[in-house]
Amino acid sequence: MKNLFRIIPIFLISLTTLQSCNNNDDENVEDVSTIVNLAVDSADLTSLVAALDRANLVSTLNGEGPFTVLAPTNNAFAAFLSANNFNSLEDVPVDILTKVLLNHVISGSLISTDLSTGYANTLATSAASQTPLSIYVDTSNGVKFNGVSSVSAADILAVNGVIHKVDEVIGLPNIVTFATADPIFSTLVSALTRSDLTTDFVGVLSTDSATAPAPFTVFAPINDAFNRLLTELNLTSLSQIDEPTLDVVLKNHVVGGANVLDSNLTDNLTISTLGGDITADISGGARLTDSSGRVSDIIATNVQANNGVIHAINKVILPLQQPTTNNIVDVAVGSENLSTLVAALERADLVTTLANQGPFTVLAPSNEAFNTFLSDNGFSNLDDVPVDVLNNILRNHVIGGRLESTDLTTGYASTFATTSASDASMSIFIDTSNGVTFNGVSSVTNANIEADNGIVHLVDAVIGLPSVVTFAVADPTFSTLVAALTRDDLTTDFVGVLSTATGTSPAPFTVFAPTNDAFGSLLSELGIAGLADIDEPTLEAVLKNHVVAGANVFDTDLTDNLTITTLGGDITANVTGGVTLTDANGRVSDIITTNVQANNGIIHAINKVILP
């Protein structure tokens, strides 16, 4: 009986084949040829057939499968042989040819609509790990594999899979192949290839698996990781990072002599990179901690090349910086008026951080400023301040880069503090209209105190962690909004609500804040003299229409036709042609300033009032 069940399908296939032979004009008869048979019948795949025969893979691809075969054309094979100095297929070592051919085979039958941007595995194995090689599929413009080979004819169906003809032979990928092919690593590639680097990173990371320092494990920062670093350091581009620093930073992401898969990671595992030691942990998610205590999450694992493996991370790993000889901490220690700051840095374990190379701009509260801060918050002394709170407040006084008084301009910068609302860098508002004031509460009393790793400006008040209200009050661009929010006849205590700490409902907040000009346009549009002419229920509804509760929405979270629910009703975001908001009346507001990050939410400035 078992043999009978085996015979029946073969018999049916034979009948179908016979019918096809007897009626070539019948277009409804399905072709049941195997992948190899279809390749034999294709005039531009004769080199592939010869290669499969030489590599003894004909029986493999005549098997049950199913397989997805990326079939290089004759022209593709000719280019491959020429580029690698082979006169013919006979000159290619059989083991190499076999591996290259298997790198064109993916398990499963994937027609063109099944292919999506991302990584898959081929039937080839990596010399570095004896695990399947990865292949990067890019569907952003046609279909391309590993950044080198494009589909020229898709969906040639076989009984045991599908063939896609491709215009290039897909060589065995190294680490550089995937970094170059995947656009999520484009900033990393720019860093690795910067012309002034003394290390030839491309050459090193292209090293064959059997040659030191290969194989490699690369913890590859994505583009957003580099963007976060530039924001953290208050820089605008990688070109502002000096060569020695960039060189050691990049080395801090490369492990030589080991192909470390995610399954090899354990808690408290010390990993020695070319730039120094980092620590891996896996409880609660795989992550890396650098020597500065910064934590990077591993967000994609086991992209397997022939000479190593890549894991994508969301934060750049920084090396341990060497203390300078007259650093910011030395300056503080040498000043009688900053003794409390020194004690605070010691308690918050930030002395080493501010003794490193930087550069940093430090807004240094005087002893009197600290005394006022402690008194206002009900603390008897520094020891009463929770260490985590003290640490973040002190970081809120540090800006990346060396900013002398003449470099400070009115507007927003980012500090080294992180927010409860989003774990992003905290914003700080600088007002230079009358001296220099930060967040509307702390003024510079003594500027431009030089240090080897940055500069210190003495300030007369501790700069607390800002709420959404802090920035609204500090930034004169929002003075009309503040006047509206504080009108004494309102039933809602907007200031109280928007001061709510993250972790307590309805915080965190996203506030689309109309500028003074936006309110001026509204008054003109309505033909009224001032806000006092707007009745209380209407003004309350208008103001609520600008506040989203329970979410810290970045500009990058916005998409076309995104419905945003405010406390007053729904509005619609769009990003094509500029970021805009459309209210229920069809009025469109442009978002003109984004991502002013407070500790309990975020502000985006808009140029038109949103009406209910």
Image (cartoon, rainbow, N blue to C red):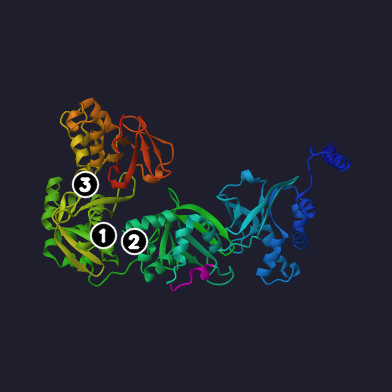
Residue position for label 1: 350
Q: Nearer the viewer, mark 2 or mark 3?
A: 3
Which residue is more in the foreground, 377 or 32?
32
List x then y, in percent, for residue 131. 61, 57
Identify the amino acid type marked 1: Leu
Instruction: Classify 10 Å Cα crowding around label 1: few (below 14), some (14-19), many (20 and above).
Output: some
Is residue 213 one of those drawn in magenta?
no
When asked about the image quadrant of residue 313, the answer is bottom left
Q: Residue at x 39, y 45 (%)?
A: 578
Identify the amino acid type marked 2: Ser
Identify the amino acid type marked 3: Asp
Residue position for label 2: 292
Residue position for label 3: 475
Q: Quadrant of the N terminus?
A: top right
Report how far apart the C-alphas of labels 2 and 1 lie in the structure.
10 Å
Point out the stretch of residues depicted in magenta.
Answer: 197-205
